[in-house]
Amino acid sequence: PVCSHGSWQSSIVKKFQEAHPDLDVTWREAGNLNDEEKRLLDGTEGNPVMVYHDGVNFIKVVGKTLMDALDRYLNEFEEKAENTREAFSLTAGSGITCP
């Protein structure tokens, strides 16, 4: 899908990535997703910007999003993951960009 906010969001995701160098952020173009990424985005309405996931838990960030919102979602994801008491490696997400 084509989305008009892709270029604008890319700079926000890059700033987020710089602020969180301990996270493994994988960049993907919307039309170039593997099966696991497609599964994570199944049923998503709108244009995904970031998906935080650990194999058990996930949170999708959709649409225009600012840096503070990405941080807020990261905190929410970390709390959710801790509450499951599952051992996981925080390899937090995929910045889904538009072509």
Image (cartoon, rainbow, N blue to C red):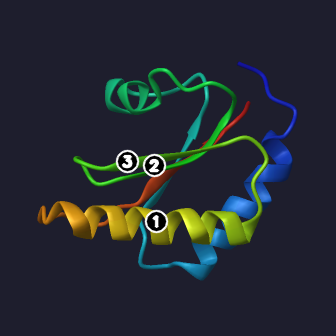
Q: Is residue 91 left or right of residue 41?
A: left
Picture disc at residue 65: none
Q: Which residue is mark 2?
A: 59
Say what secondary structure mark 3 lies in: strand
Q: Residue 1 occupies which quadrant of the picture?
A: top right
Q: Which residue is mark 1?
A: 76
Question: How many residues crowd mark 2 within 10 Å: few (<14), some (14–19), many (20+)?
Answer: some
State yes or no: discs 2 and 1 in contact (Cβ < 8 Å).
yes
- The residue sitting at 72% across, 68% down in the picture is 67
**Would residue 59 appear left or right of 62 to someone viewing this image?**
left
Camera sees residue 6: yes
The x and y percentages for residue 22 are 42, 78
* Quarter where residue 38 is shown: top left
Marks 3,1: beta carbons within 8 A: no
Which of discs 3 and 1 lies nearer the camera? The answer is: 1
Residue 13 horizontal/vertical position (percent): 67, 60
**Residue 24 position in % (x across, y down):** 41, 64
Q: Mark 3 = which residue?
A: 58
Do the numbered discs 2 and 3 sit on residues whose CB atoms are within 8 Å? yes
| Vertical order, 15 against 95 (above or below) | below
| Residue type, mark 1 in image | Glu
Q: Residue at x 12, y 65 (%)?
A: 87
